[in-house]
Image: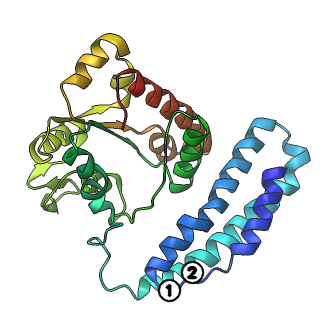
Amino acid sequence: ITFGAQFIDKAKETSSTKYKSFDEGVKSYSENLYEVDFIYRKFIWNFGQTKQNRILANLVETVEKIYSNDWLLNNNNNWQKVIDNVDVWPVNKGNSQRAFFKNHVAPFIEKKQRLFVIISDAFRYECGAELSARLQAENRYESSIESMVASLPSYTQLGMASLLPHKEISFKEGSDTVEVDGMSSSGTQGRAKILATNSGVRATAIKAKDFMNFNSATEGREFVKKHDLIYIYHNRIDKMGDDKTTEENVFEAVEDEMDFLMDMLKKIANMNGNN
């Protein structure tokens, strides 16, 4: 009920937000509007936990109507007007997804500090804000959050390739496979090869499940010792949301992912990982 009340207030306050420019729209969402998506997710998830469908039916209907018909529709329409005036998608700006390696990874490499990069597919900005707050509340971590503008078209293959070190990103002719400097970026092995070739340090990629199976004190520390840069991939949320039979459980998957990532960070710390 608390989340429902917060949602109605916040959605009404922000449902007619207008943007003068692309940058203003990105800033507006990452500083303020994301809270509507966050509160909506928390409301729907908590409603699912209550099993009180009849008592809360009117509130759920109100929240869904406001979210779909007022908030999403208005904000999307206002944002679309800005997008219609964009001649070139801003892939060369500092906050582009393609600048991720240069801005967020390279500084650690230059300082010769080991870095772990965790990539959780479909983990939205508002989820990142919640995770950042959880980390800060632990008193053993420092955390901050920044937004990035996705590459277009915004699908997994291109997004994943954009986060790797690269000079050129291209499509393999006749397919939707994305190549990084002529190397396939498909799968963990393909990404590991690109990292090893392009990063300039001892780098690799691993699936989160395999990483979590390591014994921290023995094989885990041995694995970490061999690398300066480790990309860890997980796709619990995306997998759940992509399947018609499970898509209604996607917010539950987000809650599970939060706990999973917190456990992973503790495991990394136990393997002498600091960044």
Quadrant occupied by the C terminus = top left
- State the mark number for residue 134: none
At label 2, the amino acid type is Asn
Q: Which residue is drawn at 89% across and 45% down?
A: 54
Q: Which residue is drawn at 59% across and 46% down?
A: 133
Is 97 displayed left or right of 189 in the figure?
Answer: right
Question: Marks 2 and 1, Cα distance to the nearest angstrom?
Answer: 6 Å
Q: Give the residue at mark 1.
A: 81
Is 181 displayed left or right of 155 in the figure?
Answer: left
At label 1, the amino acid type is Lys
Q: Give the residue at mark 2.
A: 77
Circles 2, 1 touching at the beta carbon (< 8 Å): yes
Give the image location of residue 38, x and y in percent. Answer: 64, 54
Give the image location of residue 201, x and y in percent. Answer: 14, 40
Residue 170, quarter of the rendered image: bottom left
Give the image location of residue 254, x and y in percent. Answer: 56, 41
Residue 137, quarter of the rendered image: top right
Q: Which residue is drawn at 32% across and 75% down?
A: 90
Residue at the extreme front of the image, as rendered: 111
